[in-house]
Image (spheres, grey):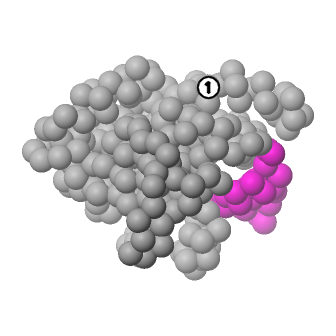
């Protein structure tokens, strides 16, 4: 079983469903509303745990009404929360609008995630003890760099999902082992990704591609499935990939694509992440294990 440390964000998602998303200055009537724990870091931590890994989460919640619910969703999913701190001010939130085709628009307010400005000695010990460190970019970049630098120094594989996409310090790319990007991020970060040993590009319903050392390349065709909501699908993909990275890129890619597809069959992020048994069953059905 892989041991994974996630240094990242945790949010409360305010999810509204609509027939179609509004244009600029337009008001439309919604069909439904739900509060769903999310955040890329939390989602990926839960996804890795459900895919079979042992996971510790390093992050922050605020001192508001959402904090306990966010802490609870990690705990109930078997993710370690001893490194989840509470800071002053609100927790992170995301406002998500999902249309009838399952596509979404997301606005993220960092809240407590933006105040994750340093790592404690205990945080660093958690990273050093892990097989894999997973990071995203919904917390301050200097914190991500510090985590990745410490992971590299201690032989921990660094998996970076550089989202939301932005310009990053050159040093960060030198300590990343695996980058997981979508097509837009791949185009934006092409020059930086050239120096990353393993690059996985998600292709939506078309699956994903892998490029590795010695020009090793492969693709997974993806899994055709009825889509309800694409929110969190990329996080389910990344978490499952990290959980099975030790089995090699082909196996990890199959698990990731299958987990990502299953995550689109339910509304919401963390609640849609599939369990290992669901992923294994679909892998067997599709013959892509």
Does dot 1 land on a helix, a strand or a loop? Answer: loop
Q: In the depicted view, which residue is nearer to us: 286 or 124?
A: 286
Magenta segment includes 58: no
Vertical order, 28 against 257 (above or below): below
Any part of residue 162 in sight: no
What residue is shown at x 53% (from left), y 57% (from top)? 104
Any part of residue 171 in sight: yes
Q: In the depicted view, which residue is nearer to us: 255 or 65?
A: 65
State the image coordinates of residue 164 (x, y, percent, origin top left).
Answer: 44, 64
State the image coordinates of residue 93 (x, y, percent, origin top left).
Answer: 31, 49
Q: Which residues are magenta?
A: 197-224
- Total numbered badges shown on the rendered structure: 1
Residue at numbered disc 1: 275
Vertical order, 27 against 237 (above or below): below
> Does residue 139 appear to the left or right of 42 in the view shown?
left
State the quadrant of the C terminus.
Answer: top right
What residue is shown at x 72% (from left), y 39% (from top)? 258
The residue furthest left is 88
State the image coordinates of residue 150 (x, y, percent, origin top left).
Answer: 35, 50
> Does residue 288 appear to the left or right of 163 in the view shown?
right
State the image coordinates of residue 167 (x, y, percent, origin top left).
Answer: 41, 75
Which of the 4 quarters of the picture holds residue 287? top right
């Amino acid at each position: 079983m892989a041991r994974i440390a996630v240094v990242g964000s945790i949010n409360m998602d305010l999810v509204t469903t609509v027939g179609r998303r509004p244009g600029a200055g337009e008001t439309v009537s919604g069909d439904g509303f739900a509060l769903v724990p999310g955040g890329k870091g939390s989602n990926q931590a839960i996804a890795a745990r459900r895919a079979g890994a042992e996971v510790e989460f390093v992050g922050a919640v605020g001192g508001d009404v959402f904090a306990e619910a966010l802490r609870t969703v990690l705990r109930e999913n078997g993710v370690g929360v001893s490194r989840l701190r509470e800071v002053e001010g609100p927790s992170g939130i995301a406002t998500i609008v999902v249309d009838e085709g399952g596509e979404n628009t997301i606005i993220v307010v960092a809240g407590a995630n933006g105040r994750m400005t340093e790592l404690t000695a205990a945080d660093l010990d958690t990273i050093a003890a892990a097989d894999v460190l997973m990071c995203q970019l919904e917390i301050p970049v200097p914190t991500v760099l510090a985590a990745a630098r410490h992971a590299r120094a201690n032989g921990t594989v660094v998996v970076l999902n550089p989202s939301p996409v932005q310009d990053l310090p050159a040093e960060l790319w030198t300590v990343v082992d695996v980058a997981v990007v979508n097509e837009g991020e791949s185009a934006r970060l092409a020059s930086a990704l050239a120096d990353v040993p393993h690059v996985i590009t998600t292709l939506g319903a078309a699956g994903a591609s892998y490029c590795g050392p010695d020009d090793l390349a492969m693709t997974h065709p993806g899994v055709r499935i009825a889509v309800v909501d694409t929110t969190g699908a990329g996080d389910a993909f990344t978490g499952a990939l990290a959980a099975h990275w030790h089995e090699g890129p082909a196996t990890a890619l199959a698990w990731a694509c299958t987990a990502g597809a299953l995550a689109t069959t339910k509304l919401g992020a963390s609640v849609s992440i599939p369990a290992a048994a669901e992923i294994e069953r679909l892998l067997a059905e599709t013959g892509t294990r």
